[in-house]
Image: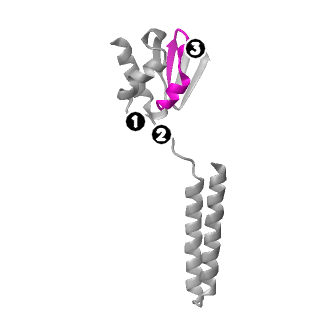
Amino acid sequence: MLKVKKQRLALLSVVVVVLLAVLWLIDLDSTTQIMGSVVFIALYLTGFYLILRKPVKKEIKEVTHRGKDILDALGDVGNITQIEHCMTRVKVSVVQSGLVDDEKLRQLGILGVIKPSNTSVHLITKEMTESLAQELEKLINV
């Protein structure tokens, strides 16, 4: 990924330098050349930002549709003893954390999985924490 970004930046730099050179070689008044240079530099900086920005991670959009799948990845209802949540995590007390499928949880949109002990799993979810905890509690109580 970094190699592709470097190539794009190099191409952008070459294009801007060529355009600036053409602008200064054309017989225009100095005010037009300066304004054109400012515009090209602004475009260059915008392109630089767009190329180097970090990609936005996909968040869980529909918790109600994925709640059952997340529950299965946690080892099903029999493996869960308690669910709590804070601002950025859903804290799940489990019988065995070895039954939890970390990779499947990440594929379902969970940003991170932490296992602080053999009987605890923290699901890092950011904004969807409360709704995910409520959905899991509904599925467990049914």
Q: Which residues are magenta?
A: 89-110
Circle 1/circle 2 CB separation < 8 Å: yes
- Name the residue located 59 percent from the left edge and 66 percent from the top edge: 44
Residue beneath disc 2:
58
Q: Please, what is the three-letter code of the amino acid marked with disc 3?
A: Gly
The amino acid on which the numbered mark 1 sits, given as a three-letter code, is: Lys
In contact (CB < 8 Å): disc 3 and disc 1: no
The reply, left or right, for residue 61 in relation to residue 8 is left
Pick the front one: 9 or 93: 9
Relative to 29, does residue 75 appear above or below in the rendering? above
Q: Does residue 134 appear in this view?
A: no
Q: Write down the residue under mark 3.
A: 98
* CA distance for labels 1 and 2: 8 Å
Residue at 64%, 67% in the rendered image: 13
For marks 3 and 1 on the same chain, the one whose residue lies earlier in the sequence: 1
- The residue beneath circle 1 is 61
Q: Is residue 15 above or below residue 23?
A: above
Secondary structure at badge 3 equals helix
Q: For the residue marked with disc 2, what is the amino acid?
A: Lys
- Which image quadrant for residue 14? bottom right
Name the mark on residue 22.
none
